[in-house]
Amino acid sequence: MRNKQSICAISAFYLTLTMRAAEAPFSARAGRVRTIVVRAVFALLFLSALTTPAGVKAQQWNVVGTADFVPGYVSMSSLAFSGSTPYVAYVDKNSERASLMKFDGANWVNVGKAGFSAGQVIFISLAFGGSTPYVAYTDHVNGGKATVMKFDGINWVTVGTAGFSAGEADFVTLVSNGPTPYVAYTDYGNDAKVMVKKFDGASWVTVGTAGASSTIAYFNSLAFSGSTPYVAYTDEGNYGTGGKATVRMFDGMNWINVGKEG
């Protein structure tokens, strides 16, 4: 109660000052009012914090497990859940290889071998097909092309062929539609257009035509609405849309714009 009374007293005090400032010439009045308002805001915020009931805490971010749980530096990471369990894939800056860890309720533990990729990777992306973790990345051992691996419960194994993209692949992003993994990436073997492929159980096949974008695309993002894939990207190629966002969807035959391009 005392804190609430303090707030009322402070409010009345600053209201009086504001009214007095209003009587001053315009140029001086504007400066005085601004000063009074700023001081009043800080005073009220401070006193309102004091009136928060005991036991009630503001929402805050909490560390999951231990902070800095990776032994070395991390250059890129990707987070996904299997049920309620968080998993994080990352590029270990020391080895520049891909690793995956999960939180077991107490600690972050490796899923399979740490640094499971054949060599240096970038643009790492994690997704689950059912309970199976898949990791996609730009694979420097295979000419900077796209590679996807999955953990079979014992080992990390390559899904399809390593380096399956036509050219170098950047901005790799991975999702699943049920148990089927899909990957989108900027393919420098196809005029730097965004390419979307899915794994059919034997090989990576193109979804729609080669090039889901009409021109150069960067910073790709892939998602599903029901069974329909959508891809968003920075559209660098169209005059008047350079650097703006474009979203396309696959209608079963073609990739079409969702709303205006760029």
Image (cartoon, rainbow, N blue to C red):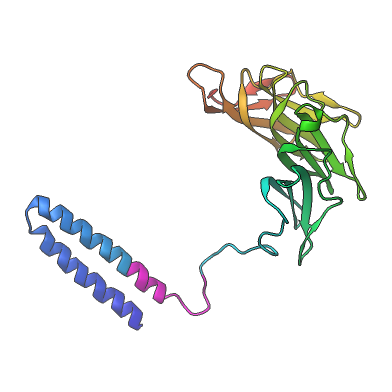
Q: In this view, does 9 lie to the left or right of 94?
A: left
| Residue located 67% across and 50% down the image | 73
Q: Give the range drawn in magenta.
A: 44-57
Is residue 35 something that shows in the picture? yes
| Image position of 13 with respect to 231: above or below | below
Query: Residue 210 occupies which quadrant of the picture?
Result: top right
- Pinpoint residue 140: horizontal percent, then vertical percent: 77, 32
- In the rendered image of this protein, does residue 58 appear above or below residue 72? below
Where residue 172 appears, as percent x and y from the top left, is 70, 33
Which is more toward the observer, 161 or 139? 139
Res 235 quadrant in image:
top right
- Which x, y percent locates residue 201? 90, 32
Q: Which residue lies furthest to the bottom in this view?
A: 2
Residue 138: x, y in percent? Answer: 74, 33
Q: For the point 73% across and 56% down, which residue is it?
A: 71
* Residue 54 is inside the magenta segment: yes
Q: Does the magenta-highlighted stretch encompass residue 61?
A: no
Q: In which quarter of the image is residue 24?
A: bottom left
Looking at the picture, does residue 200 appear above or below residue 167? below
- Nearest the viewer among 25 and 70 is 70
Residue at the image point whose x is 16% and y is 68% from the top: 16
Query: Which quadrant of the rendered structure holds the N terminus?
Result: bottom left
Answer with left or right where residue 129 lies relative to residue 39. right
Residue in view at x 46 percent, y 78 percent:
53
